[in-house]
Amino acid sequence: MRESTHLTCIRCGKRFALADHVRGCDACAAQGVAANLTVGYDAPWPALRPEGLPRGPHSMWRYADLLHAPADAAVSLGEGLTPLLDMPRLGLGPLWFKDESRNPTWSFKDRLASAAVTMARRMGARVIACSSSGNAGAATAAYAARAGLPCVVLTTENAGGAMVTQMQAYGALLLKVPTSADRWTVLVEAVARHGWFPTTAYFGPVIGSSPLGIEGYKTIAYEIAEAMDWDVPEWCAVPACYGDSLYGIWKGFDDLRALGWTRRMPRLLAAEVSGSITGAMAEGGDVPPVRPLAAPSSAASIAAAQGTLQGLMALRASRGVSVHVPDEDILRWHARLGPAEGVYAEPASVATLPAIERLRADGTIAPHDRVVSLLTASGLKDNPVAERHLPPVPRTAPRLDAALATLKEHYGFDVA
């Protein structure tokens, strides 16, 4: 395999050492542009064909020959190799979900955490750290535990619910601070003074998460392509926040095209709730505008006020589209998805559906175009959203005739 040797700026190509994963590009910053780095390789592509891919391990590290560390060094809980689920009853044309709720901590963030913590252990890190109130914190805590490393998670005063419980269950050293910005204040100093290894974004202007972690998202593209016999879909739809998964998936499809395993690149569709990347796509330039939310979003995990250059670059390179999705459309599809297809997704996952609906309607996505949408996490991560649009459970007497009468009265279900 070819192991990673350096990092490069995604915008200007400046080269950095792997140890510089905690920073963005200083040359671009001097020009007023916040640009992330990405993993680089000096060795040529391996002489590998799709039919030569190894059968194991049973995780995303099956693709280790295309990643930044060998499979036998991976910190793994069996992440990846998630299914593609056909969604024929949603009325959105040829559509599949890449169901990332099947990962060990029930979200796509496991790929980032596995890739980042693997490199952290190889580089001698002593403390893993992140800023999160959700999936990233849960995943980072689990993989740090798997690696035998302490994990500090900075979150906010109002954080709570299933994901905070999940972080604590994995042994994370969880700390609450007054505001979201305060999390970064602590982490910036901890990284600088004590060498903590950050997996997520932790300073502003935000550039995205650890480039060593984003490399893991390439495997989503590999798995989609392999599941479709290397005939990639016309579109790949992704809920967008800081653009980590957008950039990683784009890079994965770009790898496959460079290897000659696929003939083309899917167009990326970013579904976002702030409208930052959507604005940047319309206005041009390298700096997505700040677009604060007027009210809290049901898709809290993608509710960043400002997108990143890496997400913008992935869309432009794939001739993609960004769509600003209103909260009421997310809630409408969230209520519809479970009864229609038996899928319970976190609200952020559902943001792609109204975006696809809109682009099908205006002809941007042709009727025959195949779309694969990233289902980022399980609905169990955020039960209160579902509870808001579900009715109370009716009570009935413990007799069949009473139960049947209650079913007919409350649900319109008649056994006859």
Image (cartoon, rainbow, N blue to C red):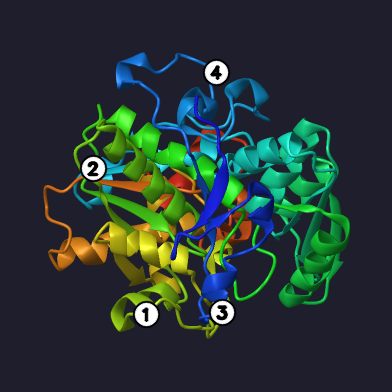
Specify the amino acid type for callout 2. Answer: Pro
* Residue bearing mark 4: 57
Distance between the alpha carbons at the discs numbered 2 and 1: 28 Å
Specify the amino acid type for callout 4. Answer: Pro
Name the quadrant of the C terminus: top left
For marks 2 and 4 on the same chain, the one whose residue lies earlier in the sequence = 4
| The quarter of the displayed image where residue 120 is located | top right
Q: Say if residue 391 shows up in the picture.
A: no
* Residue bearing mark 1: 285
Give SS at disc 1.
loop
Distance between the alpha carbons at the discs numbered 2 and 4: 26 Å
* Residue bearing mark 2: 233
Q: Is residue 380 left or right of residue 202?
A: left
* Residue bearing mark 3: 30
Q: Residue at x 68, y 30 (%)?
A: 75
Q: Residues within 10 Å of mark 1 (few under 14, many from 20)?
A: few
| The quarter of the displayed image where residue 350 is located | bottom left
Residue mark closest to the camera, 1 vs 3:
3
Distance between the alpha carbons at the discs numbered 1 and 3: 16 Å
Residue mark closest to the camera, 4 vs 1:
1
Specify the amino acid type for callout 1. Answer: Gly
Say if mark 2 contacts mark 3, CB within 8 Å.
no
Give SS at disc 4.
loop
Residue mark closest to the camera, 2 vs 1:
1
Q: Residue at x 79, y 36 (%)?
A: 145
